Image (tube, helix red, strand yellow):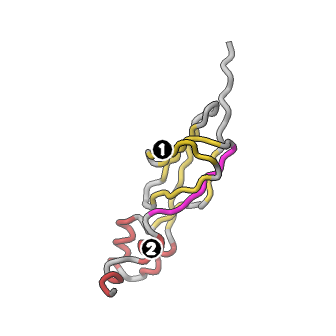
Amino acid sequence: MLCSLTFSSCATVFCGTKAQVTFESNVSEATLTIDGRKHKNVTFPYTTDVERGFNETIVKAEAEGYETTMVYVDKVLNPVSIINLTDVLGWAIDVATGAVTKPEYKVYEIELMKLKPIEE
């Protein structure tokens, strides 16, 4: 028990390395590509896990008859990581696993625009 407390950190233990976010949209179904991983036939609202870490998560939304739309999930400081206070090892583990951050919002709106008809 003492080893697990010593070699783990608060944000990693309490929050994990992924966070749940929900995507809502003005269309009923789409294909989402989240950090290169394709989610086909998604119906909204759609809740999924995104990686924590310092890089933003890029979401590409595609639906038939609509323009492709990109949404960026920015990351902010995870307040749970502050519990480490002066535990340098704990901070290092949280930084290495990405648990020191979390998505800025829990819900993201994806607004898809209809394709314009081609005029002759």
Q: Residue at x 50, y 67 (%)?
A: 77
- Residue on which the image places disc 1: 38
Say whether residue 71 is magenta.
no
112 is higher (above) or lower (below) than 8? above
100 is higher (above) or lower (below) than 89? above
Residue 109 shows in this picture: no
* Residue type at the position of mark 2: Ala
Residue 26 location in percent, x, y?
A: 69, 44
67 is higher (above) or lower (below) than 50? above
Residue 3 location in percent, x, y?
A: 30, 84
- Residue on which the image places disc 2: 11
Quarter location, residue 95: bottom left
40 is higher (above) or lower (below) than 99? above
State the SS at label 2.
helix
Magenta stretch mostly in which secondary structure?
strand
Q: Residue furthest top?
A: 120
Say whether residue 21 is magenta.
yes
Tell me how far mark 2 sits from mark 1, CA to CA: 28 Å
Q: Residue at x 57, y 38 (%)?
A: 62
Magenta span of residues? 18-26
Quadrant location, the C terminus = top right
